[in-house]
Image (tube, coloured by chain):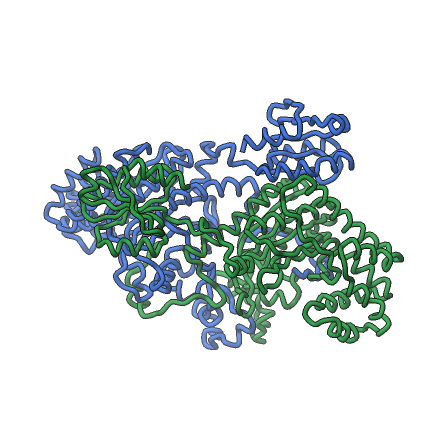
Chain colours: A green, B blue
Amino acid sequence: MPFSFCTFAVMSNIKPSLAKGTRDFSPQEMVKRNYIFDTIKKVFKKYGYAEIQTPSMENLSTLTGKYGDEGDKLIFKILNSGDYLSKANANHLSAMNSNALISSISEKALRYDLTVPFARYVVMHQNDIALPFKRFQVQPVWRADRPQKGRYREFYQCDVDVVGSESLLNEAEFVLIYQEALSNLGMTDFTIKINNRKILSGIAEIIGKPELIVDMTVAIDKLDKIGFEGVTKELIERGFTEQDIDKLKPVILLQGTNEEKLSSLKQVLSASATGLKGIEEIETVFSYVAGLLSDSKLKKPDLELDITLARGLNYYTGCIYEVKTNEAAMGSIGGGGRYDDLTGMFGLKGLTGVGISFGADRIYDVMQEVNLFPESAAAGTKVLISNFDREAELYALPLLQQLREAGVAAELYPSSAKLKKQMSYADDKSIPYVVLIGSDEIQSGILTLKNMHTGEQEKLSKDAIVDLLKAQQ
Amino acid sequence: MPFSFCTFAVMSNIKPSLAKGTRDFSPQEMVKRNYIFDTIKKVFKKYGYAEIQTPSMENLSTLTGKYGDEGDKLIFKILNSGDYLSKANANHLSAMNSNALISSISEKALRYDLTVPFARYVVMHQNDIALPFKRFQVQPVWRADRPQKGRYREFYQCDVDVVGSESLLNEAEFVLIYQEALSNLGMTDFTIKINNRKILSGIAEIIGKPELIVDMTVAIDKLDKIGFEGVTKELIERGFTEQDIDKLKPVILLQGTNEEKLSSLKQVLSASATGLKGIEEIETVFSYVAGLLSDSKLKKPDLELDITLARGLNYYTGCIYEVKTNEAAMGSIGGGGRYDDLTGMFGLKGLTGVGISFGADRIYDVMQEVNLFPESAAAGTKVLISNFDREAELYALPLLQQLREAGVAAELYPSSAKLKKQMSYADDKSIPYVVLIGSDEIQSGILTLKNMHTGEQEKLSKDAIVDLLKAQQ
């Protein structure tokens, strides 16, 4: 890390700032973020998923064209190194065409999501991986979106997918992964919504507008926000007739238990083989969930069939999920679904996949709002040993090391300082215990252990202090 | 993740590849990498260090000028979004001056190391952090270096630093952090080398060439590689006389124990107050290390005073470290030192810091070569339940969930398939146990547990299987 000192002087008046839309994470925030990621990852592993990582930078050609034109614009491109202008396309340059010029001055770009890199990974490593391939991936992605509250240019995605298995057991297990991971985080009131693309196709079929399935689902997906009237208006704008809407209405406004909804849908969709297949898939998923939970201590999930759920429909081919918390006014905290032909974009056809993701930033906000982070998720240093003079410092050194060898995070205040300063250091770092060592303590071998929460002080031997703090780990 | 299907067809013939100098990490590699990071982080925490993270992207102005001209060239710059050419400097553009144009078409860049972002962090959050501030940070950095064996364009740095404390206790604790972390990783034969910038200054002083300290240290730093003759040649090229070298020789070739070296150096440097201060600092560090270890089970570190050690000397002002493994032909696996005025580049003067880093990629290579990764560092799914037909599948579901609730990573093969296929899946994923469920098993309730290592099969009840596998966690 060769800083040149001359530069220091030149730079010294620059007040540093963060790049727009990015965040630092403090120790307190990191502990909480790690708590979320660790909890979720542990569940992924129990369900047989293994972690992979892909590079932050991909070839621009790997990413371009996968996210639509709007998406392409939001990809952060990396300027080629060296004399990049020497290879710049002269026509685009003289035309000052920023967009067209990109491909000749930028070869690499930052990952926009984890899905396309995963598809690339599967294709490149197809000879090394055993199918079904169950992987999870928790890494940052970057988007040149306009930053706003809750939307950042760098944020983590937390994806879990299986490719190469058509079994609906996977779909059922994702319901349980949501249930278990969110429960383990302390959430008690959330709904796992499920739908199936084939049901939506069936509905578009029976109203005789199969070609308008995307328009239909984009509209009904907004039912929550704009109500049935709003949906009606949008459907008409998108080419549906009043008659179509009459047929759609009972389906869109379907109420009741999952069983009741399925039973109604079976009648409505009786003429659509695709629609009936979708219903059968949902029923199979429900029966797998019931089987898995038949002898389980896990709380039954609040699993709701919601036929208005669409989520970027083009992409999904079977089941679709979305998770909503009811504990805070927050949108979706997770979603996913089945997609066929994930790797087709890279020339490997016919691989089906299904996966979900967790919205870690939103989960963080909910947990913060509802106060779900446990005390232990703030655990840093457990004990600070005070340092009043050279003699006490020398006396403290072996104790310091014994504490650490017992697995206790421990610090010795690194220089002799006033009690107040050392106590305030312990407070700032939320260190729960302080060992006080004065000349009395050194003589008697009986030290003072102060509990920073209660203010209580106890007289204890070195060994007793080590044992007491070790027992609390 | 809105893929547009039309694009799939267009892209389908593109064979994907990794961006040059970057790597994918497979499940097997991730488990090993996490083992290294987790082991090291655990030690950091025990010593009272807390984790922070900074964004991957920094303002280009935050990074420029901190790493010298060569370093600046190796920083990956991010092209501005939108119509970036509209703000491009017209003069630089018409002159086709790639380098000068950068600042008008790129505002952001990828992190080049963790030190400058840490300095920025400290300055920006100076009112929120308690000094001394003990932080660690494990994140990737990016450099546009020419890729070669062992050198990547994206790699992790693993840094631990304290700012705002002059105490040499910190220096001593870093020796123990190296010792404990590397020992916990299973390394048994490594040397922690230590030196002090003030000793090097003292040596330059006593030969009457204080202004040539950088030249002197750059030359003697190469002793290992080019021998004393090579060093002599380089010193002469760098402006030293034969007489200077005569004075330097006994110092450079200093042999013996640390005590013997210190005793010789005291005589040589008796006329240099700076040199003597450096010796005193080293002695203090040694005495802290001895104090910390006086009642410890930790193996004594192989700590060696090496006055040829320099490591980017401009940067360091006090102690300097480097760790070398003797188990494999590998360079340094870690290094660091004390630097004054870390945050001066951002206008906050007078903050001293000291820190070390671990070369995680090299540690990985050593551990791989010497076979130090424990079996448990390959632990993924513990048990696969076979799936031969619908009846067995249904029977397996509650067991699958019981295993997971007991903390056992478990999978049910997601569809009925031939035994061979399921066994080969278990083999590929190194799953140590398979539960076989056939119609006999379902009738008797006594299942077959196959140990995939030994090939042995045992007949056990469901509960016994759960207990057995749970006990192995």
Q: Position of residue A332 (x, y in %)?
A: 62, 61
Q: Is residue B459 left or right of residue B367?
A: right
Q: Residue furthest right?
A: A271
Residue A259 sits above or below residue B373 on the image: below
What residue appears at the point 61 percent right and 43 percent down from the top-left corner?
Answer: A49
Quarter placement of the C terminus of chain A: top left
What residue appears at the point 69 percent right and 27 percent down from the top-left corner?
Answer: B447
Q: Position of residue B472 (x, y in %)?
A: 54, 31
Residue B375 sits above or below residue B143 on the image: above
Count of numbered circles in the view:
0
Residue A144 sits above or below residue A395 on the image: below
* Quarter occupied by residue B370: top left
- Residue B460 in view of the camera: yes
Q: Is residue A297 left or right of residue B39?
A: right
Q: Residue furthest left?
A: B271
Q: Is residue B382 left or right of residue A303?
A: left
- Residue A123 in view of the camera: no
Q: Position of residue A228 (x, y in %)?
A: 75, 71
Q: Is residue B271 left or right of residue A246?
A: left
What residue appears at the point 39 percent right and 59 percent down from the top-left corner?
Answer: B117
**In this orientation, which residue lies closer to the viewer: B219 or B17?**
B17
* Quarter occupied by residue A96: bottom right
What residue appears at the point 38 percent right and 58 percent down from the top-left corner?
Answer: B118
Quarter placement of the N terminus of chain A: bottom left
Q: Position of residue A264 (x, y in %)?
A: 83, 58
